[in-house]
Amino acid sequence: MTEIRKFETDIVVVGAGNAAMCAAISARENGASVTVLEKAPESEKGGNSTYTHGSIRFAYDGEEDLKQIMPDLTAEDFANTDFGSYPEEEFFHDMCRMTEYRTDPELASLLTGNSFETMKWLVSHKIRYVPIYGRQAFKVDGKFKFWGGMIAESVGGGPGLVGSLYEEASRLDVEVLFNAMASELIHDDEGVHGVIFKYKGRTSEVRAKAVILASGGFHANPEMRTRYLGPKWDLAHARGSRYNTGEGIQMALNIGAIASGNWSGCHSVGGDRYLPEFTEGFQRLSYPFGIIVNAEGKRFVDEGADFRNYTYAKYGKLILEQPGQFAWQIFDQKVSGLLREEYRGKQVTKVKADTLEELAEKLDGVDPNGFLQTVKEYNEAVRADIPFNPNIKDGKCTEGQAVRKSNWANTLDEGPFEAYAVTCGITFTFGGLKINSNAEVQDILYQSIPGLYGAGELVGGLFYFNYPGGAGLMAGSVFGKIAGENAARFIHKAKESDGLKI
């Protein structure tokens, strides 16, 4: 009989992305020994965080706040850039309106209210940030202007963020085990006492005084997607980490944790129709400056309803609902220079033509006559008397169409024309475990499960239907930090009650 390998620590963290590593660092700096279980091999560490741009949303009041987060900014940077402000109240309002006022107000308040202090905490742990020029700001009249409430990203994007978190965890002597797949919580009537896991193919266990679950949702599990999100979601393109398959959530449900949040909802974006799953470079997010058509050649969504980072996480679902689960984004030369960097490169499904008639014949799977009629009617409906401005919701709209375009509506009449084939990509799921303000996982009686904490995409109740861009990484950091602090406090109390020296 194979002997079970045994480990022991104060706190075990399941998962190793942004939320998990923030929890590990927080617990460690609060005096606890920490072991992290990462299901993936070291070469694929970091969960979904690795696949992000590192863009993060936080509340700030102006230049003095930003100097604390990005100390390398110069006087010239501030002179050439309008960073604006993003008060906590506006962040909270965005959380409410994006989720149709279903977000858990207590969790949303913690997220928005702690966002700036958490950013300062991250900076204190050597995470560096820079402005998102190019994706969140356009230069108008010689000055960059940021829009949409999000201005910063981690140096090196998602991989840079993950690398910095791991370096800091290593400096603090956090133990990380790779190829370590958690499968079961060790628990009894007194609470949770550790985790059973497969380590390099062998059943092992780690005994601990507290467990923090931060292993993501189930976006990479087509069976769970279909069961909870509904028909066709098994056909969605899976983005991000292939290891986010829902075991962390299921382990907690198995011991009586209560499910929470939008289990039939997810973060879903439009991206390249033909890229393999789990491949970087999927997203195609400059759609506000063009039109999107389906297989019938018809528009089906208001491309200019709001800034991109307030609509992109729900428009993938609309593409999934179209015939064949695909669409095409169409642009002309007036706006081609505004397309994000993801539209360039070798792994892009793109066609180009000098005329609309020629383009219509190149749109694979699209009715050419329907497309040409759509463009004709769209061009006739565009308000020519309103100036175009990509930095604000400019009100340049269409009139008299069944599907209105509310902003940035330019006529499509200057060739050459460009078109990009897109489909639905799922990034992360919104349903998960219920936690309280201390990040303690709640059971079906709405009581805390002693010694069990949750953070990151595994937590339910924050996002419904939609998502403000950058709020996911912020939520992971805020609740990871809170989970680490409270798990450390929990074990210190346990040690004191046992009469042990801390």
Image (spheres, rainbow, N blue to C red):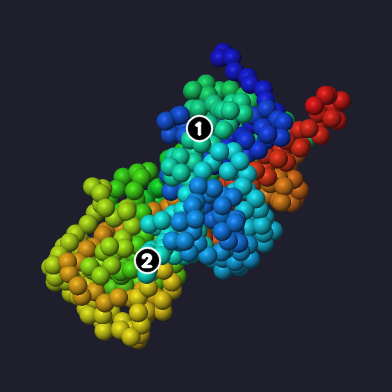
Q: Where is residue 426 in the image (x, y as percent from the top left)?
A: 42, 52
Task: Write down the quadrant of residue 93 in the picture.
Answer: bottom right
Task: Write down the quadrant of residue 301 in the picture.
Answer: bottom left
Q: Is residue 124 visible?
A: yes
Q: What's under tag 2, amino acid-wise? A: Gly
Q: Is residue 480 visible?
A: no
Please state if 332 lies on the left or on the right of 458 as rendered: left
Location of mark 1 (residue):
39
Which of the pair 396/204 is nearer the observer? Answer: 396
The residue located at (55%, 23%) in the rendering is: 203
Which of the pair 36/203 is nearer the observer? Answer: 36
Q: Image height check: is 150 above or below 355?
A: above
Marks counted in the figure total: 2
Q: Residue 486 carries which label?
A: none
Which of the pair 365/397 is nearer the observer? Answer: 397
Q: Position of residue 77 (x, y in %)?
A: 46, 56
Location of mark 2 (residue):
142
Gap in angstroms between the C-alphas marked 2 and 1:
48 Å
Assess disc 2: are there few (<14), some (14-19) or many (≥20) residues with their C-alpha within 10 Å of its C-alpha: few
The residue located at (85%, 27%) in the rendering is: 498
Q: Are marks 2 and 1 in contact (CB under 8 Å)?
A: no
Q: Which of marks 2 and 1 is nearer the N terminus?
A: 1
Q: What's under tag 1, amino acid-wise? A: Lys
The residue located at (56%, 52%) in the rendering is: 67
